[in-house]
Amino acid sequence: MKPGDPSQNDADLELMQRVSVDDQAAISELYDRFGPLVFRLAHQAMPTRADAEDAVQEIFVRLWRTAGRYDPKRAALVTWVMLLSRRILVDRLRRAQARVKTSVMTDSISAEADVVEAGTRIETDERFASLMKRIEELPELQRIVVVRSYLGGQTLRQIGKDLNKPIGTIKSALSRALVRLRERSPGEELAA
């Protein structure tokens, strides 16, 4: 992993240290910053909105409990949040799959469809984690633009304004990032 912006790493570390000591303002800041992203991921992975909401709650409780273990030298905060989210979602899907297997035979056709759907979600989550690792390897501006536009839902104009960069620079950074992300890593298979 390439080191990120030192000031952002320091701010992320300070935020997580405050979360670890139950600073309510820090917990709110963490939720405000990552809540929409985590919910979007959970909503895509879980079968119902209620399941997604439960998963988001579990994810943020785990973030709160493990905040003291966050190390910006190992991963950017967004990557750490996404990987932890993925693990929890995969665990929840596996538990659901195990419950499906113990259900009665009359539900077997429906259960098989749920298992196939859960397997597809797990595979999608694994691809998402791989993509997040590749995003983390992008140069800083490209990484910021991709994360804010695709994961944070910001427009390119908003990103340019936040970063005090011309819109052309932001568009170029996004374009270059997408080209890099489309390139296959050595040993990667072509998608069927």
Image (cartoon, helix red, strand yellow):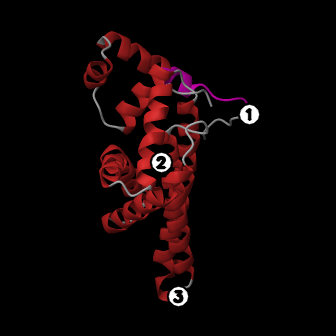
Q: Earlier in the sequence, mark 2 or mark 1?
A: 2
> Does the CB distance between marks 2 and 1 fall below 8 Å?
no
- The quadrant where residue 157 appears: top left
Disc 1 on helix, strand or loop? Answer: loop
Q: Amino acid at mark 1?
A: Gly
Does any portion of residue 120 appear in the rendered image? no
Q: Where's residue 147, x and y in %?
A: 42, 33
Q: Is disc 2 surrounded by few (<14), some (14 to 19) or many (20+) residues within 10 Å?
A: many
Real-space Cα separation, disc 2 to disc 1, in angstroms: 27 Å
Relative to 116, say whether 68 is above or below: above
* Quadrant of the drawing holding the C terminus: top right
- The quadrant where residue 101 appears: bottom right
Does any portion of residue 145 appear in the rendered image? yes
Disc 2 on helix, strand or loop? Answer: helix
Question: Residue 185: within the magenta?
Answer: yes
Q: Which mark is residue 105?
A: 3
Real-space Cα separation, disc 3 to disc 1, in angstroms: 42 Å
| Highlighted magenta segment, given as a residue range | 177-186
Question: Residue 88: within the magenta?
Answer: no
